[in-house]
Amino acid sequence: MKAAVVRAFGQPLVIEERPDPEPGPGQVLIRVEASGLCHTDIHAAGGDWPVKPTPPFVPGHEGVGIVERLGDGVTWLAVGQRVAVPWLGHACGRCEHCLSGWETLCEEQRNTGYGVDGGYAQKMIASAEFAQPVPDGIDPREAAPLTCAGVTTYKALKVAGVRPSQLVAISGVGGLGHLALQYAKIAGATVAAIDITDDKLALAKELGADIVIDARVQDPAEVLLRHGGANIALALAVSEDAFATAYAGLRRGGKLVLVAMPAHGTLRVPIFETVLNGTSVLGSIVGTRQDLAEVFELHAAGRTRVIYETRSLEAVNEAMAEVSRGEVAARLVFDM
Ligand code: NAD
Ligand code: ZN
Ligand code: ZN
């Protein structure tokens, strides 16, 4: 099988021919049909974060495909079934986080395309308990972006407790942002979308953003405050400045949800204003299996649109460069 491999941080990925991996007990072998390119994969290949993967590794945590073989003891999935393999590739199931519905915080979790090989390959292994069945009728190329971009932003809005009367700011209308915008609209909120490219701003308008802010020529905080300030701001842009402006655009009692993870990123929060305004700053990491099931249900019901373009796996390096330059229509998906 073919796989795109990170051999060293900051170096182009290498397309390799490898033997098919063997599913161990509790695992399945999947023939990958489609695999999304999340900006996290670019951070992974760059070694951007304090906790790093160990090269060589295969990135990708939006892999969708057909179960081809079952490892010992797998009863929950069947051969021929379509599944998605998210970032949360495995969690212990026993710790306080797993037991309280926060498996995303499990300290023993394994992360697909980071700690274990991921979806940039024709075949991949997944833990059967964490491979999410994809409902019939969802195109695998649409299921792929939902598997991280969808579930992550759906969860971030859940964590923020979004309500219909609220103004929600979506900072960055990329892979994550274009779905975040739709979930905020489904929740009934008024949505302000912020980006720095004409295409993304046009897309935001098309997807129903009520307010569109071009951060190249407008101060997002000033525009948000003119509308009363955001109740919730999701920081989805890979830019520290964008975090600071989103914070500044909150109304009293507002919540800033940190989701994007720029390399070496820090956010300086003014103590006085944070205290007096009762501001919350929260981190949010992907979503649970239940969150992903809900995301797929919404899509199967026709309530979300996934905007994507396909690429071949061989074009992986150019694809990453395109996403870094913000030149793509929301998400790139490798069509296997
Ligand atoms: P993306 O590249 O598809 O989207 C980023 C968007 O931000 C682009 O549209 C870009 O034009 C826009 N942007 C850049 N600078 C901006 C600025 N100053 N103001 C406003 N918009 C700006 O990336 P993505 O795949 O959506 O991922 C975004 C980030 O989220 C990455 O850092 C990724 O690692 C992170 N992420 C986090 C989680 C999590 O669980 N917390 C999950 C997935 C991705
Ligand atoms: Zn991701
Ligand atoms: Zn656990």
Image (cartoon, rainbow, N blue to C red):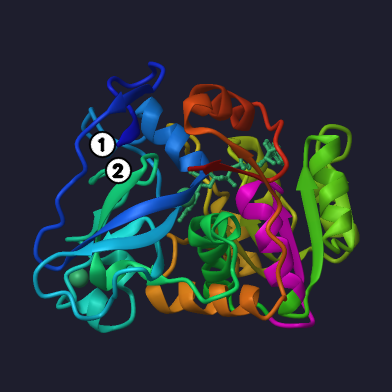
Q: In this view, does 119 lie to the left or right of 205?
A: left
* Pointers 2 and 1 in contact (C-beta within 8 Å): yes
Q: Is residue 38 left or right of residue 123?
A: right
Q: Residue 326 location in percent, x, y?
A: 68, 32
In depth, the one of 30 and 94 nearer the eye is 30
Q: Spatial distance from mark 2 to mark 1, Cα to Cα?
A: 5 Å
Tell me the residue at 49%/60% (across/down): 147
Question: Pointer 1: what residue?
Answer: 53
The numbered mark at residue 114 is 2
Q: In this view, does 317 lie to the left or right of 203?
A: left
Tell me the residue at 34%/33% (across/down): 2
Tell me the residue at 38%/29% (across/down): 45
Element on which disc 1 rests:
loop
Q: Which of marks 2 and 1 is nearer the N terminus?
A: 1
Kind of residue at badge 1: Pro
When the figure is inspected, residue 168 is found, relative to residue 96, above or below; the finding is above
Q: Give the range drawn in magenta.
A: 163-185
When the figure is inspected, residue 329 is found, relative to residue 75, above or below; the finding is above
When the figure is inspected, residue 195 is found, relative to residue 210, above or below; the finding is above
Q: In this view, does 136 lie to the left or right of 69?
A: right
Q: Residue 229 location in percent, x, y?
A: 79, 63
